[in-house]
Image: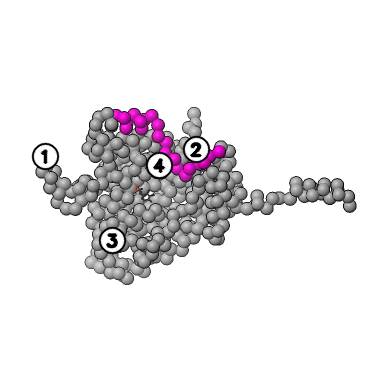
């Protein structure tokens, strides 16, 4: 056999053989994401705010007016705009989403000696807000499709772990009152509110929405944030609309609204000159400067959502043909803001997931895994919990992809 022949055969092999690396999941996922984002240099952040002329105009108006603190017309205008967007009669703007959630729980009367059921699959603020009241988080499992609390698993768990005593739901193991159930709409996908409400009603426990990620999402035609007794929004820098930092408490209950307003603004009794506070309230009010910026963002929200949904549709179409990576679409009956686009990898180990993340990040695509489940964090490891096997599985399989509205140009 001549050397030339061997050489030629090697070259043929090189052309015919598949590169095994191209069969691997990391390669397939990077290729798919690149086909949506294009071949720019990046990096592509997970969620970048879009701040433009309108934000500058309102912030400038606010500065020029001198009303930069918590009193001023921009806070009122913002609260009215959010009430309109979320279909609620009362909005109280706060300094953060965590503050909003804490305030909502405090206004409901949650405190020392209580437990609050929360999803383990959430951002840490959901459980932290419970802790701040003195109550103990009690972790419940996620649903595979909505990624929010699973109403069927919740019912089963409460049937096992709770008793009803004189109209009050108590956790059997601790004897503590179950004072609330917090539902979180993960990545903007609404949880199954009707079924969750049935469970909560059966146990006479109020539902609270952590709607931090779901501004502009809706469920059965009704906006997230209007689907429970009281809800919290966040306007942190990476949320769909940002105030730099901020949050809001939403409710349709006038009495509860009054309580939120009082507790959230240092529990000061209204008076022309006296400074009298009737309990240890919180200084949680959003400053006007932030409200001005956020008002512009809320006015632009319909455009952000339109573009984010187009981007999501392109991810969805692309991942249809990627074995081992499923795009998480909006659940039935829901319309999602697609805050963070999410795929579920068909992997069995963290190492396999991390190989995908590393390949994306090496390519300038700043993907990230879902949060470490809350029941595994050191400060919550000893809290009561349901069977969390779905959460455990999802935690190893979900990753978020770049989702900024600016990745999708407006269509004519
Ligand atoms: C962002 C977020 C919050 C609140 O966060 P802040 O940074 O305090 O505004 C609460 N819960 C969830 C699920 C969130 O994603």
Q: CA distance from mark 4 to mark 1?
A: 39 Å
| Of the image marks 3 and 1, the number of the one nearer the N terminus | 3
Residue at screen point 52% across, 41% down: 43
Which residues are the magenta region?
Answer: 41-61
Residue carrying label 1: 272
Q: Position of residue 184 (x, y in %)?
A: 38, 52
Mark 1: secondary structure: loop
Q: Is residue 104 magenta?
A: no
Residue matched to label 3: 135
Q: In the depicted view, which residue is nearer to us: 203 or 75?
A: 75
In the picture provided, is 88 more to the left or to the right than 400?
Answer: left
Counting from the top left corner in percent of width and height, residue 186 is at 42, 51
Q: Nearer the viewer, residue 367 or 220?
A: 367
Question: Which comes before the other along the chain, label 4 or label 2?
Answer: 4
Q: Residue at x 48, y 43 (%)?
A: 45
Q: Secondary structure at mark 2?
A: helix
Label 3 or label 4, whichever comes before in sequence order: 3
Left or right of 320 in this view: 275: left
- Camera sees residue 202: no
Q: Position of residue 399 (x, y in %)?
A: 50, 51
Q: Are marks 3 and 1 in contact (CB under 8 Å)?
A: no
Helix or strand or loop: what does disc 3 sit on?
loop
Q: CA distance from mark 4 to mark 2?
A: 13 Å
Point out the tag, 3 or 2, that comes first from the N-terminus.
3
Q: Residue at x 29, y 48 (%)?
A: 100
State which tag comes first along the sequence, 4 or 1.
4
Kindly check if marks 3 and 2 are in contact, taking CB atoms under 8 A apart as contact.
no
Mark 2 neighbour class, 10 Å CA radius: few under 14, some 14 to 19, many 20 or more: some
């Amino acid at each position: 056999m001549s050397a030339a022949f061997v050489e030629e055969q090697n070259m043929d092999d090189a052309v015919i053989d598949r590169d095994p690396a191209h069969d691997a999941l990391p390669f397939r996922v990077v290729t798919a994401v690149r086909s949506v984002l294009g071949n720019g240099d990046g990096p592509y952040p997970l969620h970048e705010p879009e701040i433009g002329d309108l934000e500058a105009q309102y912030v400038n108006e606010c500065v020029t007016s001198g009303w930069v603190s918590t009193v001023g017309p921009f806070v009122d205008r913002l609260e009215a705009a959010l009430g309109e967007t979320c279909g609620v009669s009362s909005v109280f703007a706060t300094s953060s989403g965590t503050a909003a959630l804490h305030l909502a729980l405090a206004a409901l009367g949650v405190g020392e000696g209580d437990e609050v059921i929360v999803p383990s699959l959430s951002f840490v603020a959901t459980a932290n807000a419970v802790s701040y009241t003195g109550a103990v988080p009690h972790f419940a499992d996620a649903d595979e499709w909505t990624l929010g609390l699973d109403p069927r698993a919740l019912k089963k768990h409460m049937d096992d772990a709770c008793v009803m005593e004189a109209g009050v739901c108590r956790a059997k193991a601790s004897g503590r009152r179950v004072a609330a159930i917090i539902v979180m709409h993960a990545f903007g996908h609404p949880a199954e509110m009707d079924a969750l409400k049935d469970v909560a009603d059966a146990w006479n426990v109020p539902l609270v929405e952590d709607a931090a990620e779901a501004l502009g999402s809706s469920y059965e035609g009704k906006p997230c944030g209007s689907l429970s007794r009281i809800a919290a929004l966040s306007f942190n820098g990476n949320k769909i609309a940002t105030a730099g930092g901020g949050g809001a408490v939403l409710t349709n209950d006038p009495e509860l609204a009054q309580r939120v307003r009082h507790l959230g603004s240092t529990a000061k009794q209204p008076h022309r000159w006296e400074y009298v506070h009737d309990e240890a309230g919180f200084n949680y009010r959003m400053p006007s400067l932030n409200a001005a910026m956020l008002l512009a963002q809320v006015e632009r929200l319909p455009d952000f959502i339109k573009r984010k949904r187009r981007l999501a549709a392109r991810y969805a179409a692309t991942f249809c043909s990627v074995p081992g990576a499923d795009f998480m679409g909006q659940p039935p009956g829901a319309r999602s803001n697609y805050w963070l686009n999410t795929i579920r990898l068909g992997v069995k180990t963290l190492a396999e997931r991390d190989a995908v993340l590393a390949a994306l990040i090496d390519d300038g695509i700043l993907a990230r895994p879902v949060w470490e489940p809350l029941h595994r964090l050191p400060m919550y490891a000893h809290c009561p919990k349901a069977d969390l096997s779905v959460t455990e599985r999802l935690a190893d399989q979900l990753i978020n992809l770049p989702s900024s509205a600016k990745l999708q140009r407006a269509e004519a």
